[in-house]
Image (cartoon, rainbow, N blue to C red):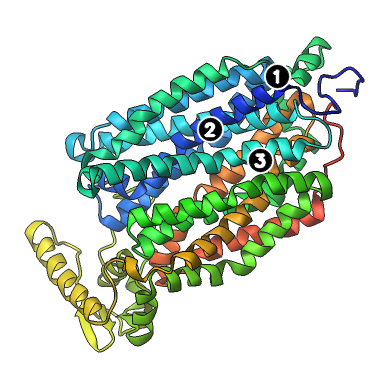
Amino acid sequence: MSATTHHHSPRGELSQGHKKVIFASSLGTVFEWYDFYLYGSLAVIIARQFFSGVNETTGMIFALLAFAAGFFVRPFGAAFFGSLGDRIGRKYTFLVTILIMGISTFLVGVLPSYASIGMAAPIILIALRLAQGLAMGGEYGGAATYVAEHAPDGKRGLYTSFIQTTATLGLFLSLAVILTCRLTLGDEAFNAWGWRIPFLGSIILLGVSVWIRLQLSESPLFQQMKSEGKGSKQPFRDSIKGGNLKLMLLVLFGATAGQAVVWYAGQFYALFYLQSVLKVDSTWAYLLIAAALLLATPFFLFFGWLSDRIGRKKIIMVGCILAAATYFPIFKGLTHFANPAVEEASRNAPILVVADPETCSFQFDPIPGTRKFTSSCDIATAALARAGVPYSVEPAQPGSLAVVRVGQAEAPSYEAEGLAGDALKAHQGEFGGVLKAALTEAGYPEKADTSRINVPMTILLLWILVLYVTMVYGPIAAYLVELFPTKIRYTSMSLPYHIGNGWFGGFLPAISFALVAGSGNLYFGLWYPIGIALMTVVIGTLFLKETRNVDITQ
């Protein structure tokens, strides 16, 4: 689109009306993120409710993958809703996406468990997650494009950074509702049925959000483009042509992939690590994460504002470099300050799994039932991974039975191939009892001692993780909007954003959990976000341009 002097994006401050429109857009996005993150925050309970028909390790990985399923389809939602938004307008996609998101979330709250309806429960749950993912794929690009096309020149970084706070605010809102329900009902009632309340309550947020979205007016740049007859009839096809396709790929690998893994490592994986690895009480874990989020959220706006002054790209790249350089010491620090007993016990009584290496598998089963982990090595390492304790594997004679050595104590494992029913339960009970006694004797805690949590230092480390999130995420919306032309902007920015966040970011918890379970090293899962972040730094630095002074009316 050619530059004009009569476009509706003013050079000065936004009008009061535009501020209200942008606030409405941001608030609706808060509600959508709230819906989406309820599932991630309740992954442990979801695993018990809907995947109880498989072993615990596979159940947890599958629950995380069901969460990731919503991310997997986000690029398809981006393609469909982005194309729709580029053809008929930004405003109408908002209503459709939020209705799909809200109804899917409400239905999770009324879905019977595995114990009630068997395999139908996880199948329906995954279908609802896919619907949520499609809706989210259409949401973000529309909100970012809509706000950027209203913002005054020189302030797009600041104004779009308000959209960036909505993901953290939505996560915070979901944690706050979960925590309130848990404290009001007690752990037993919450785990049994109270976890459904946050999902059911989202129907109220849906009503408010739909009412807000109905107040929106269309983007001025989109209106101008349509009035001049310069829109695209096939935005998706135009987006994947030649030079624009190359640019989208560079944006994916040189910006959004790194932004995504830093985002998910700093918020979701940190919460998962506290709960599932360090065995910190859920309420404490929520409070610690919530405190870090509250303290760090203003920095989304700061880095958005700073990107208007010094550029978007360098802030994103520095965030990725800092994350990659410091993840190992930060997560080791979390272990030291949140559950020091694990560190002490592993130093005083290191754990060895003495086993035939040929019998030790990488325990990643994306479709439960397609792989069986029945060897004595797999049974031993899975039990230790669930206990959240580090271990190493020492080679043994071929064909020998795996043995877990905890200090001077030994717990012989068993071969589960061919075992079923009472015989399998008897072996599980015997091995589990001996192993638990050995771990307890060696000082390995079943749960983190809350009286020993160093709260200020734990919050500080979590705050640093979220600070990296604000660096990579605060400027990204303005950066993506400025890279693509108006007629295909919604589609072109949505695709690399949602492939990056949906695939590279969304699969982080499941990949990292499988890496930890397979290696015995509590920190081994960090290699995934570190590798992706470094890839982004190299590609982004070499091949992407700075955009803060571009004219987005083109």
**Image label count:** 3
Task: State the residue at coordinates (71%, 35%).
Answer: 159
Report crowding for label 3: few under 14, some 14 to 19, many 20 or more residues within 10 A (C-alpha).
Answer: many
Q: Which residue is mark 2?
A: 136
Q: Indicate the position of residue 158 as horizontal and vertical percent values.
A: 73, 39
Chain-order first, disc 2 or disc 3: 2
Residue 17: numbered disc: 1
Quadrant assignment for the C terminus: top right
Structural distance between the alpha carbons of marks 1 and 2? 26 Å
Pick the residue in front: 194 or 125.
Answer: 194
Q: Which residue is mark 3?
A: 496
Q: Which image quadrant is residue 202 in?
A: top left
Chain-order first, disc 1 or disc 2: 1
The answer to whether residue 513 is left or right of residue 124 is right
Residue 198: numbered disc: none
Kind of residue indicated by mark 3: Pro
Task: State the residue at coordinates (24%, 45%).
Answer: 191
- SS under mark 1: helix
Q: Indicate the position of residue 162 as horizontal and vertical percent values.
A: 65, 37
On screen, 262 above or below 109?
below
